[in-house]
Image: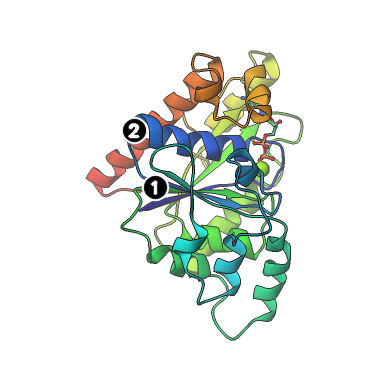
Amino acid sequence: MKTISVINLKGGVAKTISAANIAHIMATMHGKRVLLVDNDKQGNISKMFGLHSYNSRTVAELLTDREAEIHDIIKPTQYKSLDVIPANMTLLKANLQVLLDTGRPQQTRLRAAFKRISDEYDYCVIDCAPDINISTINALVASDDVIIPIKIDNFAFDGLAELKEQIDIVRDDLNPSLTLRGCFITSYQNNDVNKQGENWLRENTEYPVFNTHIRRTAKVDESTFANLPIIEYSRWCGASRDYIALVSEYLESVSESDTTGGK
Ligand SMILES: Nc1ncnc2c1ncn2[C@@H]1O[C@H](COP(=O)(O)OP(=O)(O)O)[C@@H](O)[C@H]1O
Ligand SMILES: [Mg+2]
C-alpha cells in the first residue's frame, strides 16, 4: 500500500475535494484498491460519502486505542474498491489525549495501524486538516508521498516553507522515505494572477510542481451539494478532466520513480 497525504496549512484550497476525487478516480478508473482516510475533525470526507456519525468508530480511535480493530473502523462506500476511515469532532479530543499519553510513541500510531492492512489496499489517501498537529504528524509519518494543493490568491504561499520544514523534520527523524511528490494548482482561472502564481511555483525549484492544474469549475461546488465525486456528477467538466489527468500524472511519476529507484 502506498500512502499519500494531501496537505496544506491553509483551509479552502481543495484538500478535501482533491483527496476524495483522486481516491475515487484511482478506484473507479484505474481499478486500484483505495482507502480514503478522513483526518480532519470537520469530517467533510465522511459527509461526502454518507459516513459521518457519532455512533461508529473513527480515525480518532486509531490514535488513542492501541487495541482498536482497524477493520471495524473502515467503512465501504457505494463505489467498488473504495473504502473510507471516517472522522468527526472526537478527533479534537483525541489529539489532546495523544499528547497527554506519553506512555507509548505518539507520532507513529497511524503507521502502526496501517501496517495491519497494507496488503489489502494499493493506495491510501489521507485528507489532512489545515494544521500541524499530532494528527497531521501521524499522517506524515504514515505516508510515502505528500501532495500539496494550492489555490492562488494573495496569501497562497503562506505556510509553504513551514510545511516543507515539517516534512523535512518527519523525514529526518521518523520516515526517511517520505517524498514531497508535488504541488498542484487548484481552482485555476485563466487570468494574470493565476498564470504568475503558477510560474512562480514552477521557477522555484524547491517545490516540485505537477504539470496538471485543476480548473475552477462551478460544477465542483454543485458536486459537494449532491455528495458526489466530480466525475460522477459531471464527467466532462474541466475539473473532472483535470483530476483524471492529475491522477494519471501521479501514477506515472510513481511508476517511474519505482523503476529508477529514485524518489
Ligand atoms: N476546481 C474547483 N472549482 C471550483 N470550486 C472548487 C474547486 N475545488 C474546490 N472548490 C471549492 O472550494 C471550496 C473548498 O474546497 P475544500 O476541498 O473543502 O477545501 P479544503 O479541504 O482545503 O478546506 C469548496 O467549496 C469547493 O467546492
Ligand atoms: Mg478539508
Considering the numbered disc 2 on the image, is that residue within a helix, a strand or a loop? helix
Looking at numbered disc 2 in the image, what kind of residue is underneath it?
A: His
Q: Which of the two discs, 2 and 1, labels the residue nearer the N terminus?
A: 2
Q: Nearer the viewer, residue 68 or 254?
A: 68
Q: Quadrant of residue 260?
A: top left
Residue highlighted by disc 2: 30
Scheme of image coloration: rainbow
Image quadrant of ligand 2 equals: top right
Left or right: 80 in relation to 66: left
- Can residue 214 be seen here? yes
Q: Is residue 168 visible?
A: no
Q: What residue sits right under mark 1 in the picture?
A: 123
Task: Return the x and y of residue 95 as percentages of the image width and height.
Answer: 68, 67
Q: 55 left or right of 229? A: right
Q: Position of residue 208 (x, y in %)?
A: 48, 38
Q: Residue furthest left?
A: 259
Residue drawn 71% across and 49% down?
42
Instruction: Inspect the image, locate mark 1, and give the three-letter code of the amino acid beneath it.
Output: Tyr
